[in-house]
Image: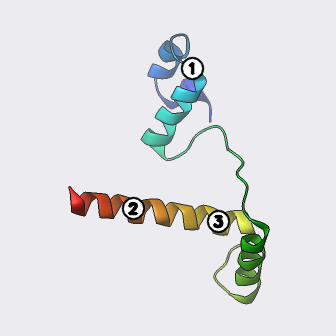
């Protein structure tokens, strides 16, 4: 992402707040950011993910795609639960 073309606020904000906050702003605004984080996943769960990918025809190219979609779905599910409770 070219941060200076994404939004006119980025050049202004970049001198004032951290790139981490700008990244969060872009993710919130556009659903994407210019960085990724690494997390640890228990090996037995990775093996289950690999087995699920290899035995299904759901179109996952790798375990990262599968895990990203699973986390995204869980976050959406929790968001809906929170809306119902509010």
53 or 57, which is in the foreground?
A: 53
Residue that badge 2 annotates: 78
Label 1: how many Cα within 10 Å (few below 14, some 14–19, many 20+): few
Task: Report how far apart the C-alphas of labels 1 and 3 lie in the structure.
Answer: 28 Å
Comes first in the chain, label 1 or label 3 = 1
* Label 2 close to label 1 by CB (< 8 Å): no
Comes first in the chain, label 2 or label 1 = 1
Label 3: how many Cα within 10 Å (few below 14, some 14–19, many 20+): some
**Numbered badge on residue 67:** 3
Indicate whether 22 appears above or below 37: above
Q: Nearer the viewer, mark 2 or mark 3?
A: 2
* Label 2 close to label 3 by CB (< 8 Å): no
Which element type, helix, strand or loop, lies under badge 2? Answer: helix
Residue that badge 1 annotates: 18
Label 2: how many Cα within 10 Å (few below 14, some 14–19, many 20+): few
Indicate whether 26 appears above or below 63: above
Residue in view at x 67 percent, y 86 percent: 57
């Amino acid at each position: 992402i070219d941060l200076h073309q994404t939004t006119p606020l980025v050049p202004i904000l970049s001198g004032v707040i951290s790139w981490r906050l700008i990244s969060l702003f872009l993710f919130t605004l556009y659903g994407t950011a210019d960085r990724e984080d690494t997390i640890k996943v228990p090996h037995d769960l990775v093996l289950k993910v690999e087995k699920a990918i290899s035995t299904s025809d759901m179109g996952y190219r790798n375990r990262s795609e599968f895990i990203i979609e699973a986390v995204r779905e869980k976050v959406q599910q929790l968001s809906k639960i929170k809306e119902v409770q509010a």
